Structure formats: structure tokens, C-alpha cells
Amino acid sequence: MTSVMDREHQVVMQTYGRTPVTFVSGEGSWLTDETGKRFLDCLTGLAVVSVGHANPRVAAAVTEQMNRLVHVSNLYYTEPMVELAEHLSRLSGMDRVFFANCGATANEAAIKLARRWGQTLKGAACYEVITLDDSFHGRSLATLAATGQPKKQETFQPLPSGFSQVPPNDIDALAARVDDATAAVMVETLQGEGGVVPLEVEYLAAVRELCDARNLALIVDDVQAGMGRTGTWFSWQQLGFEPDIATTAKALANGLPIGACLANSEKAKAFQPGDHATTFGGGPVVCAAANAVIAEITERDLLKNCTERSEQLRSGLLGLDGVASVRGRGLLLGAVLDEARAGEVAGAALDNGLIVNAVRPDTVRFAPPLTISPDEVDTALTRFATALG
Ligand SMILES: Cc1ncc(COP(=O)(O)O)c(C=O)c1O
């Protein structure tokens, strides 16, 4: 019989360098492949399945909503979306939400909102967004233009104009780039795809100050670091500042596709009816899933578990031969190896039943579920030690 892998090679566009494993089921922190082998999932589909695979509360909420109402479009009102917007507003301290379908489309909304705000306030020439080197904001054309990784941009020129990058943690470089055309500054507080690199807290405070002084919108891309991943609902909440606009996506519905752009009232009101729209955004099923995720994180006190398991994982990793340092916050950690062999180590970990990924030649990313238990963290550490060899 032809394998799933061979069939994929015939009919799916070859845009991914997939690892040769075919998963068939999951439960909690564990995945099972087609041979029945079990893997401890310390990557959660790229920081997505935060309340665990086949989470019963999410499954029940989705099933119930599937049986009741799946889709009506944004021409009409539906309650799960409004409930989710109320939750996100309460948890983030931001006033209004636009629902998108993934991280890139949440960021597209944020960029369009910032442009609309800038142009309404300061005129047509005010639309530029400054982002950071090594950032990652998505693969649509505008979010790719925002992404500070020239290699990913190379083959898609010309990209939309209105974006430029400056080095992270250098406030003078940022201040020097701001001019009358600048509408916004967009940052991740922790660059996940860029190698699990946290920005300095003092830098983020200085960015906030600069945005206030020059009347710029500060956008935080919390697509990867939001929804409890770093130990607070949103990553900035432990860093002493607030953005004007923020996005989140990955973990919001535990694996169902959704994104959200949040904004304070002053920025949000720049969007007028007709300015932005999407057919699927905020649909009842994904919003029911996200409402269940929020209930799960709240009732199981998973932010606390995130912080405690983070300390356990960080100190355990630091004790392993071959690990030089550990970067990151909460349960988004990068183990920096003393040699550039992260790909080889992640491969050995997989053979040993542990899922992690190489995010830089010398850095292995850990993003386990927020539900991970102390015993499972110990298992991850034992398996990773074997992989380090
Ligand atoms: C910080 C950040 N922004 C945006 C994105 C894009 O999200 P999506 O792949 O859902 O479009 C990602 C994905 O890794 C991300 O990490």
C-alpha cells in the first residue's frame, strides 16, 4: 500500500520540509503515529494545542456547536463570537476585537487598522510600519513584507511598500527611522520563529515611550506568545507596558483556525463599516472552541502550571550536558546548544519519542502544552538528554 507520505509527494504542493512521521491521534501531551508509536509532544503543532490533544471540554463545545449552527457569515450576529470578544477584551484590557482566520490575517487586520488610523489622523502619506530584524509576522504578501527575514522575502519581490526593519533592542536605530510617514511600530515581545529570542524589557518600555512621544501605534504580535504561552494571558502583561493594537492566533482555539486583532478604542474607531471583512472570521464553531479554551485555562489554573513547569523545564535543561543556555519565557523556551547541531538533536529526540524542533542551527524550541505535568517534563528531559547523546 502506498504510504501517506508518498501520496502527499504526488498531490500536495511541496512547500514544506515535513518530518517523516504520520500522526493519527493524540491525547493530552501525547501523539500516536500510524505504527502505534507514542510521542511526548513538546511542540504542540507550533505552540497551538495548549490545552492538550483531544481536550474533552473543547471537543464537547465544538460538537455541541457543530450540531447547532456552523456558519452564517458576518452579515449577522452570533453569540459565541460576542462571548469570545468579551473574554478577550476582559483578559487583554483592550476594548475591541476583529476576528480573523490565522496569525497572518490577524496581522493584516492590525496593519490595515494602523494605516487607517495613521492616514485619518495625519494624512495620506502616513502609512509606514517599522518592524524588527529576525521578526516573523506571516506569509501573506504584507506580513511577509513586515517580516524581518530577507531570505523568506527574496523570491517574492516586489513586496508591498510601507515596511522597513531595524535591529531589535536598539532604541536609537528605531528613533532614527521614525519620520512623518511612520504610522506604527510592530514587535513580538519574544521572537519565536526568529529563534526564541525575548526582547529586552527596557527596550520594550523605550518603544512604548517613543510611540507615545511621536504619536505612533504600537502593535504587539502575540500570535505565538499570547493566550497564556508565556505565563500571562498576553505576553506584555508581565513586561510593564501596553500596546495599542495586538494580535493573537495560534493557541486561541487549540488547533482550530482563528486569529484576533485587538485594539484600544482610540485606534479601533479608525475602522469604519466596510473597511475590513472576512467570510469565516469569528464563526460560531471556532469561537465556541476558543471560549472552551479560555474556560479550561482559567478553571485549571494553567497560567500557574505554565510558570511552574517553565521553571522545572528551564532548570532541567540547564543541567544537561550539551546545553549552553536557555532563552524564552513561560513554556516557549529555546535550548541553546554548545554546538550548531539542533537539527540532528531534534531528529534524535523524535526517534526517542520526543517532539521538539530546531528553530536555529544551535537552538531547539520547546513549546509543550500548558497542561503538561511535572512527570511529563521529567520524561521530556530524560528523552532530550538521550538525544543530546
Ligand atoms: C509571531 C507570529 N506572527 C504571525 C505568524 C503567522 O501565523 P499563521 O501561520 O497562523 O499565519 C506566526 C506563525 O508562526 C508567528 O509566530
Image (tube, helix red, strand yellow):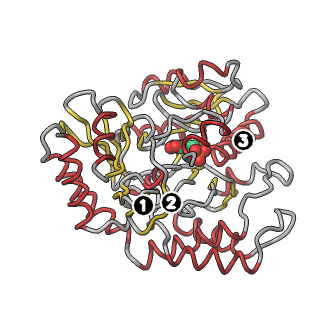
Residue at coordinates 66% horizontally, 29% vertically from top-left? 128
Q: Secondary structure at mark 2?
A: strand
**In the image shown, does 308 or 26 lie closer to the viewer?**
26
**Apparent side of residue 341 relative to residue 227 in the rendered image (left or right):** left
- Beta carbon at label 1 within 8 Å of ligand 1: no
Find disc 1 in the rendering and name its residue: 32
What crowding class fits label 2: few (fewer than 14 Cα within 10 Å), some (14-19), or many (20 or more)? few
Q: Position of residue 213 (x, y in %)?
A: 53, 37
* CA distance for labels 1 and 3: 41 Å
Residue at coordinates 59% horizontally, 18% vertically from top-left? 154
**Apparent side of residue 313 relative to residue 102 in the rendered image (left or right):** left
**Apparent side of residue 32 relative to residue 139 in the rendered image (left or right):** left
Task: Name the residue type under label 3.
Answer: Lys
Q: Position of residue 247 (x, y in %)?
A: 58, 51
Task: Name the residue type under label 2.
Answer: Val
Q: In which quadrant of the rendered image does the C terminus lie? A: top left
Q: Position of residue 383 (x, y in %)?
A: 22, 52
Q: Does the CB distance between marks 2 and 1 fall below 8 Å? A: yes
* CA distance for labels 2 and 1: 6 Å
**In the image shown, does 269 or 334 lie closer to the viewer?**
334
Residue 251 higher or lower than 301, as above or below: above
Residue at coordinates 66% horizontally, 81% vertically from top-left? 64
Residue 69 higher or lower than 109, as above or below: below
